[in-house]
């Protein structure tokens, strides 16, 4: 019976149910194809991107290394036969990610088959034989026309199945990430001591990215100390070092990097068998680890500490979605740490005269002007009214915009957001730039319910449509906190401000891109 795609198709349908992962599917697929077509085979994944190239072999003793045909003078879009007799069937269809923060959704593949009955050319350096569309209908040396036609179908089917596995895997990862953030919010809202909360969070975060060790360093009064550590298995692995040694030049350089906002995270690798020269690599090895990621804890640009997740075995570079979720989880932790150890005090009295002028970037009023206004609020007629509300707006993941596109695009986003906010407010209502990516609006004659409706309108106008920049469209969302003045309960205007800040923090913990009123 001739080899046919009909022999492969039922197996693919079954493998979609039984395979445990994309890797498992690819390994089984090449074994099935090789057996069906009586050949030795290799399945190449990621041929359109050398950095992601992977190969699956039909036989364990297959010794094929670099394929040699992938990127030399461009990759042929048609199937071809190499001088050594190997038949190669590529399928290139690069699909760009929906946004710069997403991984590539599909990858080009190639099927390479070798029949021992096909002799190699005298010199493997001679050019490959590329089959034209007309030739592809005819038999190639060692392969029948029916086999070639069926193999074309097989490659397309394998490609579709593989990308279905990728989509399924990404959906599962998204569910796990949502669960991780929910668990983080639950723990931080519990009555457990902060060090206990952090230990459990390190456990959850570590398992999510395959780490087996973790720690959090907290900075107070310029001193870096250990708040919590986590070890998956303390019997077989030494614990992460305690507070001693954290003020070394090694950590000082890392602190300065994070303080200056020069990095949103730091990945460290120390492959086995390789000489480690950098201080961080040496420290990693001293902890019995081979890979790790460090993330800064920031609140309003203030550096509060470091979260580290380590692994005792080497791993692939961290995925963009893994890092994004970890950053979001650490931001939630930052709110808790700041509230307990770093309360933010009003800055009235320390402003320079120039700070009372408008913000040169956005054209908004400055934080100094807002705090002067709040300071004078008890002397105004509005103080006796419950019709005054404060709205705070904090842009979500704005640091990621700066990290991805650069500060010039970040500045453009801030200007556009400020303009969108002003366009939705009554004439004379001021927009204040309260922080780096935070805006405030003081609404007179506006109770909380009405202020929440205003905030919802502002939230919508920020997110739709995407902002246009020199690098293309950038989508941005914002979290809002709304607080209404309560003269009988607010001893001063700072109480109003703190309640609005608390509402913003709650919106962040609940998933961002929403309005919370208090």
Image: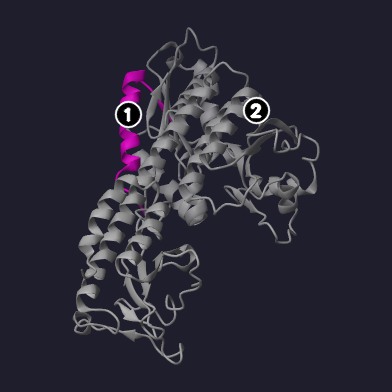
Q: Which residue is mark 1?
A: 454
Q: Identify whether 85 is placed above or below 434.
A: below
Magenta segment: 441-468
Mark seen at residue 360: none
Q: Pointers 1 and 2 in contact (CB under 8 A)?
A: no
Drawn side of residue 463 relative to residue 268, left or right? left
Q: Which residue is mark 2?
A: 342
Q: Is residue 334 visible?
A: no
Q: Quarter-wise, where is residue 294 in the image?
A: top right
Q: Position of residue 275 (x, y in %)?
A: 73, 61
User: Which residue is painted at 35% across and 69% down in the image?
Assistant: 111
Q: Position of residue 313 (x, y in %)?
A: 62, 49
- Residue with the most extreme top position: 488
Mark 2: secondary structure: loop
Q: Quarter-wise, where is residue 311 in the image?
A: top right
Drawn side of residue 502 relative to residue 214, left or right? left
User: Which residue is painted at 80% across and 45% down in the image?
Assistant: 248
* Label 1 vs label 2, nearer the camera: 2
Drawn side of residue 428 relative to residue 266, left or right? left
Q: Is residue 480 visible?
A: yes
């Amino acid at each position: 019976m001739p080899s046919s795609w009909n022999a492969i198709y039922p197996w693919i349908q079954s493998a979609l149910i039984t395979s445990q992962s994309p890797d498992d599917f690819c390994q089984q697929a090449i074994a099935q194809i090789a057996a069906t077509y009586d050949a030795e085979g290799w399945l190449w994944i990621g041929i359109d991107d050398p950095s992601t190239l992977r190969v699956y072999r039909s036989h364990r003793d297959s010794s094929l290394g670099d394929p040699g045909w992938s990127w030399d003078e461009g990759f042929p879009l048609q199937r071809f036969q190499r001088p050594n007799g190997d038949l190669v069937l590529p399928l290139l269809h690069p699909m760009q990610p929906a946004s710069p923060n997403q991984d590539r959704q599909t990858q080009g593949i190639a099927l390479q088959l070798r029949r021992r009955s096909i002799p190699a050319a005298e010199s493997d350096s001679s050019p490959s034989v590329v089959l034209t569309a007309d030739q592809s209908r005819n038999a190639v040396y060692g392969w029948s026309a029916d086999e070639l036609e069926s193999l074309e179908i097989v490659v397309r089917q394998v490609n579709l199945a593989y990308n279905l596995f990728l989509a399924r895997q990404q959906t599962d990862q998204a569910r796990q990430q949502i669960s991780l953030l929910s668990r983080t919010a639950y723990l931080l809202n519990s009555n457990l001591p902060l060090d206990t909360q952090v230990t459990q969070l390190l456990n959850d975060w570590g398992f999510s990215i395959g780490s087996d060790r973790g720690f959090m360093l907290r900075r107070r009064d310029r001193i870096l100390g250990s708040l919590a550590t986590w070890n998956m298995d303390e019997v077989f692995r030494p614990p992460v070092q305690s507070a001693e040694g954290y003020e070394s030049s090694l950590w000082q350089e890392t602190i300065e990097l994070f303080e200056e906002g020069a990095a949103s995270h730091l990945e460290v690798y120390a492959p086995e068998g390789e000489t480690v020269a950098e201080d961080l690599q040496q420290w990693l090895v001293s902890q019995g680890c081979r890979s790790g990621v460090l993330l800064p804890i920031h609140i309003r640009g203030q550096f509060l500490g470091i979260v580290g997740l380590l692994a005792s075995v080497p791993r692939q570079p961290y995925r963009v979605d893994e890092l994004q979720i970890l950053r979001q989880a650490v931001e939630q932790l930052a709110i808790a740490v700041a509230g307990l150890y770093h309360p933010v005090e009003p800055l009235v009295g320390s402003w320079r005269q120039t700070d009372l002028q408008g913000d040169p970037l956005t054209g908004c009023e400055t934080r100094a002007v807002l705090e002067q206004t709040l300071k004078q609020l008890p002397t105004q007629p509005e103080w006796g009214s419950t019709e005054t509300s404060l709205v705070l707006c904090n842009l979500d993941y704005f640091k990621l915009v700066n990290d991805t596109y650069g500060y010039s695009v970040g500045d453009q986003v801030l200007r556009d957001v400020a303009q969108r906010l002003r366009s939705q407010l009554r004439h004379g209502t001021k927009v204040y730039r309260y922080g780096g990516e935070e805006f405030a609006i003081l609404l007179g004659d506006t109770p909380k319910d009405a202020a929440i409706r205003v905030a919802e309108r502002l939230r919508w106008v920020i997110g739709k449509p995407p902002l246009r920049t020199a690098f293309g469209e950038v989508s941005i969302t914002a979290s809002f906190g709304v607080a209404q003045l309560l003269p009988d309960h607010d001893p001063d205007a700072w109480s109003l401000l703190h309640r609005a800040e608390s509402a913003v923090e709650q919106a962040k913990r609940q998933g961002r891109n929403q309005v919370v009123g208090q």
